[in-house]
Image: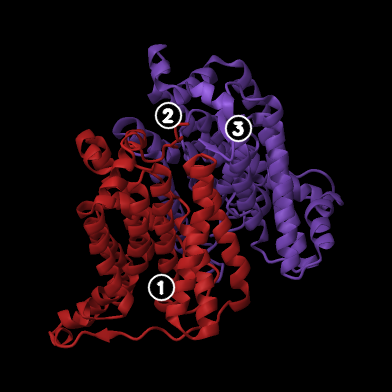
Chain colours: A red, B purple
């Protein structure tokens, strides 16, 4: 019983890491006022490319770089559509997402079923010797720790730096921001690019570390969960991280319960994050004040630069 | 905004020529990109083009396949377009399709020895209502709590998939099916009649789609309700001033879209599949969004866009065998279509003009 619980809690951090990485990227994008629904496709393409590169070079680091770059590449296509051609953000996100899924399948079919060596766990000296907690919190791979650091960095950037303030202003009202001398198009482009790189890292982690065995449906809806997480965390980095670990634990809990012979259908556990997201969305949307405090006001609206 | 003496100007009127040119340019650009891509992958471009665009039209069996794939795409896209014109973003048609199929399948699964002529009409009604109800959840949450229908319909799609998997591993699984996650085969009374000759799988859903298309065309061009919907989406303040309700636009858009998707779900299980199984559609719910846009959100445009998209699906299956093109090629092509469409649509709303330096100065002064 105790072992099962430790397994769930320790595994939850790794399971949650791709969700957290992608959600942090999407959070920054949405804070700049852009809704990018192509996370699933960006993750799928970068998962394939990172797997391919890691297989060739034997280096996870190079694989991650390649994954980040391929996420950025698709994000650039999205950015050109919504910023350059002022296309509808929902449609553009779906278009780029579908493109990414297709390309992932195209590239991935040559290494169907192949495996990679995983990434070693790092036991933090001293801390990992703490009974129970040590095995849960302090014996993880390097990316798990990096994701936690990334959460803090994103929070610091958004709420403690001038650049973060600029980004948030643009997400609230790009026209006012422009009148104040800020550059909405440039800032949004950088935000979208950051979202692409983070989705790329998330994809790379999923395919080269978490389940280093290639299968066609590698990402399996995790990009959508990342989009949901941003809403679930009400656009706050800390809450997004808590949500990611919660969703990670819930998805593993299903497996653990099955292993212990407790008959809750796995599908109900899988549904839980989606249901919770709807509940949170309804709760925050119904209260207009709380929406104003958290959701970027200009989310999803095209911005046409004044001529 | 000007660049090298070129300036982007908003068009005050959208040119009808551009509206027609955009889908054509989109298709040509996508085909060129695909040919370049597959040549790079080592496939013969001639064979690929032939497999994709000629062979699907070359036999009555293939034509039938194009029609039964076009039906759900057109059906769903017609429903979605009504919502998109009102700026209601139902992107969960895939989930509404699944729920429609599940509920409709209850009739032939529980009355699997029935020969009743009421079976099919029953399935059609139940499927459409179920799709409607699933989309209705999003409509209720949007209309009453202002919860984004984009996120809710997306989440509901993922939930619908899990509901389907759950039912197929337990309650609806064929008891003598060696534990495969699928239902019993439907009786003939629960299958759409086919037409077009021996072995051709074109069926009733093609007729239903035609009827719905004509109905939508009349609705969109002739009815006041459609006008109110559109105004509500484009200018909600004007709509409120005129007494048109935005709430009603949300409900109508989602319910119509859900019903169409549910109906498409019935078409799959009562058509080529003939039972309930884990995979009911190759992403028709998402592809239909592309069809709706490519068709300019107009019933007639959607009809042709749907036929074209079906060609890509069937052509992709053929090219898989003849040219060794991977199964995900049609997906890439779909993505390219929407990317190019969105880029070229820019020129419907804007024009790029070379403005002489001095005029610009005078204009500024």
Residue position marked by numbered label 1 in the rendering: A205
| Res. B211 in view | no
Residue A136 versus residue B83 in the image, above or below:
below
Residue position marked by numbered label 2 in the rendering: B251
Q: Nearer the viewer, mark 3 or mark 1?
A: 1
- The residue sitting at the right extreme is B58
Marks 3, 2 in one chain: yes
Name the quarter where the N terminus of chain A is drawn: bottom left
Q: Is residue B36 left or right of residue B95?
A: right
Residue B274 horizontal/vertical position (percent): 64, 53
Residue B172 versus residue B219 in the image, above or below:
below
Q: Nearer the viewer, mark 3 or mark 2?
A: 3
Residue B71 horizontal/vertical position (percent): 67, 42
* Residue B297, label in figure: 3
Residue A141 versus residue A180 in the image, above or below:
below
Determine whether label 3 and label 2 are within 8 Å by CB.
no
Q: Nearer the viewer, mark 2 or mark 1?
A: 1
Determine whether label 3 and label 1 are within 8 Å by CB.
no
Which residue is located at x 50 percent, y 39 percent? A88
Q: Give the chain of mark 2.
A: B
| Res. B66 in view | yes
Instruction: Give the alpha-carbon distance from disc 2 to disc 1, as whole Å.
Output: 41 Å
Instruction: Give the alpha-carbon distance from disc 3 to disc 1, as whole Å.
Output: 39 Å
Instruction: Give the alpha-carbon distance from disc 3 to disc 2, as whole Å.
Output: 19 Å
- The residue sitting at the front extreme is B358
Q: Give the chain of mark 1.
A: A
* Residue B48, label in figure: none
Element type at mark 1 = helix
Q: Residues within 10 Å of mark 2 (few under 14, many from 20)?
A: many
Which residue is located at x 33 percent, y 36 percent? A173
Element type at mark 3 = loop
Residue nearest the viewer, comparing A259 with A277? A277
């Amino acid at each position: 019983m105790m072992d099962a619980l430790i397994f769930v809690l320790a595994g939850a951090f790794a399971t949650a890491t791709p969700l957290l990485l992608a959600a942090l990227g999407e959070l920054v994008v949405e804070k700049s006022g852009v809704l990018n629904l192509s996370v699933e496709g960006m993750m799928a393409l970068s998962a394939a490319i990172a797997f391919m590169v890691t297989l060739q070079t034997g280096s996870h680091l190079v694989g991650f770089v390649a994954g980040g770059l391929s996420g950025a590449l698709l994000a650039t296509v999205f950015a050109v559509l919504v910023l350059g051609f002022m296309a509808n953000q929902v449609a553009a996100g779906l278009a780029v997402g579908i493109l990414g899924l297709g390309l992932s399948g195209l590239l991935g079919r040559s290494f169907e079923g192949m495996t990679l060596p995983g990434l070693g766990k790092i036991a933090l000296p001293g801390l990992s010797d703490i009974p129970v907690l040590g095995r849960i919190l302090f014996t993880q791979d390097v990316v798990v720790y990096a994701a936690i650091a990334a959460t803090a960095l994103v929070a610091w950037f958004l709420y403690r730096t001038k650049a973060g303030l600029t980004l948030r202003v643009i997400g609230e009202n790009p026209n006012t921001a422009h009148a104040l001398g800020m550059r909405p198009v440039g800032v949004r482009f950088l935000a979208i690019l950051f979202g692409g790189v983070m989705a790329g890292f998330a994809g790379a982690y999923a395919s080269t570390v978490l389940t280093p065995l290639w299968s066609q449906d590698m990402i399996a809806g995790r990009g959508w969960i990342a989009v949901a997480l941003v809403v679930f965390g009400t656009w706050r980095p800390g809450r997004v991280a808590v949500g990611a670990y919660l969703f990670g634990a819930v998805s593993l809990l299903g497996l653990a319960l099955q292993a212990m012979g407790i008959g809750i259908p796995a599908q109900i556990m899988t549904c839980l994050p989606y249901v919770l997201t709807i509940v949170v969305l309804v709760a925050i949307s119904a209260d207009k004040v709380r929406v104003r405090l958290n959701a970027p006001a200009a989310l999803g609206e095209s911005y046409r630069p004044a001529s | 905004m000007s660049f090298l003496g070129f300036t982007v100007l908003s068009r005050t009127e959208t040119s009808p020529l551009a509206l027609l040119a955009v889908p054509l340019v989109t298709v040509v650009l996508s085909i060129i990109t695909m040919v370049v891509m597959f040549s790079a992958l080592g496939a013969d471009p001639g064979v690929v083009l032939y497999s994709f665009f000629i062979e699907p039209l070359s036999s009555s069996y293939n034509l039938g396949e194009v029609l039964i794939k076009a039906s759900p795409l057109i059906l769903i896209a017609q429903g979605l377009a009504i919502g998109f014109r009102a700026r209601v973003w139902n992107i969960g048609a895939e989930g509404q399709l699944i729920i429609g199929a599940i509920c409709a399948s209850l009739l032939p699964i529980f009355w699997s020895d029935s020969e009743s002529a009421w079976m099919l009409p029953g399935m059609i009604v139940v499927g459409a209502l179920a799709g409607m109800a699933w989309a209705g959840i999003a409509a209720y949450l949007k209309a009453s709590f202002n919860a984004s229908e984009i996120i809710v319909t997306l989440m509901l799609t993922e939930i619908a998939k899990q509901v389907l998997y759950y039912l197929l591993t337990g309650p609806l699984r064929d008891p003598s099916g060696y534990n495969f996650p699928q239902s019993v085969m439907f009786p003939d009374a629960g299958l759409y009649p086919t037409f077009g000759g021996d072995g051709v799988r074109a069926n009733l859903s093609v007729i239903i789609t035609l009827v719905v298309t004509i109905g939508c065309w009349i609705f969109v061009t002739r009815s006041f309700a459609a006008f109110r919907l559109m105004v509500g989406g484009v200018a909600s303040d004007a709509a409120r001033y005129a007494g048109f309700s935005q709430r009603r636009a949300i409900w109508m858009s989602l319910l119509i879209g859900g019903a169409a998707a549910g109906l498409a779900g019935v078409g799959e299980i009562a058509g080529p599949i003939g039972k309930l199984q884990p995979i009911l559609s190759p992403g028709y719910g998402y592809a239909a969004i592309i069809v709706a846009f490519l068709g300019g959100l107009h019933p007639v445009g959607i009809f042709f866009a749907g036929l074209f998209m079906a060609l890509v699906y069937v052509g992709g299956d053929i090219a898989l065998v003849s040219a060794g093109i991977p199964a995900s090629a049609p997906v890439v092509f779909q993505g390219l279509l929407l990317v190019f469409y969105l880029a070229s649509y820019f020129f419907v709303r804007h024009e790029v003009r070379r403005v002489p330096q001095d005029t610009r100065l005078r204009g500024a002064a």
